[in-house]
Image (cartoon, rainbow, N blue to C red):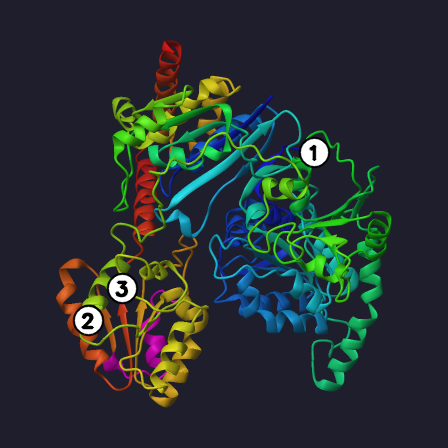
Amino acid sequence: MEKLLLLGAEAIAQGAIDGGMSGVYAYPGTPSTEITEYVQNNKIAIERNIHRQWSANEKTAVEAALGMSYAGKRAMACMKHVGLNVAADPFINSAITGVNGGLVITVADDPSMHSSQNEQDSRFYGKFAMIPMLEPSNQQEAYDMAYESFEISEQFKVPVLIRITTRLSHSRSGITRKELKSENPLTYPEDPIQFVLLPSNARKRYKGLLGIQSAIEEAAEKSEYNKYIEGKDKSLGIIACGIAFNYLMENYPDNNCPHPILKIGQYPMPYSLLDKIVSECEKILVLEDGYPFVEEQIKGYFDKSGKITGRLSGAIPRDGELNPDVVGKALGKEIKQYFKVPEIIANRPPELCSGCAHRDIYNALNETMKEFGKQKVFSDIGCYTLGALPPWNAINSCVDMGASITMAKGAADAGVRPSVAVIGDSTFTHSGMTALLDCVYENTPVTIIIADNATTAMTGGQTSPATGRLEEICIGLGVKPEHVRVLTPLPKFHEEMVKVIREELLYEGVSVIIPRRECIQTATRSKKEQKVKTEEVAQ
Amino acid sequence: MKADIILSGVGGQGIVSIAATIAQAALDNDLFIKQSEVHGMSQRGGAVYSHLRISDKPIASDLIPMGSADIIISVEPMESLRYLPWLKEEGWLVTNSIPFINIPDYPDLNLLHSEIEKFPNHILINADEIARQVKSPRSSNIVMLGAASPFLEISLENFEQAIKKIFGRKGERIVELNIQALHAGREFSLTHKEIK
């Protein structure tokens, strides 16, 4: 079969499609977005009509995937690491309900925070939920694991977590496909109350989850993804999790590592393999991208011997993603560097695109806020977060999806006037609507600017469920229609924008301002596509 | 055969297209490939890079170790210098000479060019001008690919095939313009390489 050149994220998508998936559910988030986008454009997925539309947020995504699993079919929910915080409730509880059709949660962590607000490690969530977990080291494993994950889920009747990191998600390599599996038929769970987590039933289900722990541990012991590679020099043993294995092998070009290696790709941690390497070797180096998940557990609380090394011991930096050089240094290898970056090189941080509507919004907001004082603008996750940087320096917070509105509310409760939130349209429907309801409920004096560019822009222009519905949603939630103000953010309307913003800042109640203009990226793209289509028709 | 390539530029300048074309050409040659790229926030006008590794043997790391890249291909002069710690001692620096200025403290262009010219193995090419000459002003990234092509052990035919595959969706005319851009960039490097 022809090799496909795929990103790690795409390999997971192809593996899931070939593994008989009937639906993918996700909210866009770097570095996970490309999984769902791949399914959306895949021929088989379209022919099979695999569910592939975006969800409002990660929680609704996991819940819908759980519903599909209830109906006997194979489903995957995908998200970035912080998305699993949003989805933590259905995620943890899906381990208690168990599954009917295979259920897989794929989470892309972002060590080094390339596009995120933290570098939390999703393996803790997998352990917390007590479910099997897979961590590929390369694109082929990403494909294979996604392909097999539904069966693992159906075998143990619990969800499976696949954990990848940015580097694997956004790196391409050749993939060999396996045979396409058919989808599961529609079936109902054998036990009609399996999914009813009333305390009496939840206690039974939880005992069941505890009961399968030894079986999922045994599966990890026997997994082909956990490999003990013999080595003569036992002064050091190396444990390499997921992609860390590649950085290790990069330092031993012809597979000539003299030390025993334990490659980990399936969890719970393979205890007897760990026991073997720790008892045979004098010293242990743990290589893992993210937090010291394995290191901390095998070191334990009381071990002060210094035998176990890694991120906690300082052998590897405590934060930031791994790379061949960080690993090489820990192995005592010399790092080559022939040239330095010349001093004249300036930083080039990301910025709002030229022609972006957010520029006009911040110009108007900044001018208005001059009259009202500094540090009163709460913002959110999206392109508009770049308003925190010069030349605007317009916002004072960016914490989690939807937090702008609720933080503005809390600040208003504390006496901040005016208290302003700036949030995007997609972020608003992700997690801002309940926050707005809190404001309406108490008629809190807040001014909420929903910067509507009709897309989920930062992740590359995915559709936004808010498009065409924002006024209705806000009025439906109880905002007074006369305080829902729609504007067109263009330089020529600057004065009008300033006037409207001022009026609403002075209003002692909930107001929503919606500056609306399509994202310059998606607008340019759709214009180009339209042009290609017209030319095709002309030919 | 082994080539470790760093591609650099500013988000939106098309380095992903260069990387995809080289990767496709390598795949058609039955070579192993790893190509790491930047998505997300940095794509908005920030500095972006891609690590592309091709080899006739399996490749371990998605990232190139420091001091071992064979070539830096940059569509922007300042960005070409940002990744120098990855270049090996006898590596090639192949860069567009035309700056993309979207920051207030962009360095003096003459200073930048002289930093580039310090390297014995460098190609400094006005890819924008060459792209205009072949009537494909948007193909300066493919001009850069052409300029880098003599340093990669992949045949011109393979690159042409790859361009057909990558740009095929956009129509025959776009494919033809990009192939012309590839040739023009290659021609520049072949003549300027000889002089040294």
> Height in image: A92 above or below B148?
below
Disc assigned to residue A516 = 3
Q: Chain of mark 1?
A: A
Q: Chain of mark 3?
A: A
Q: How far separated are the C-alphas under marks 1 and 2?
A: 60 Å
Percent x, y for residue A11?
A: 60, 45
Q: Earlier in the sequence, mark 1 or mark 3?
A: 1
Q: Are marks 1 and 2 on the same chain?
A: yes
SS for dot 2: loop
Q: Earlier in the sequence, mark 1 or mark 2?
A: 1
Q: Which residue is mark 1?
A: A252
Disc assigned to residue A370 = 2
SS for dot 3: loop
> Height in image: A201 above or below A323?
below
> Which quadrant would residue A419 be assigned to in this image?
bottom left
Please check the rendered image and state whether residue A333 is part of the magenta-colored stretch, yes or no.
no
Q: Indicate the quadrant containing the C terminus of chain A: top left, top right, bottom left or bottom right.
A: top left
Q: Is residue A229 visible?
A: yes
Q: Chain of mark 2?
A: A
> Height in image: A500 above or below B107?
below
The magenta segment is: A466-483
In this view, the mark in front (1 or 3): 1
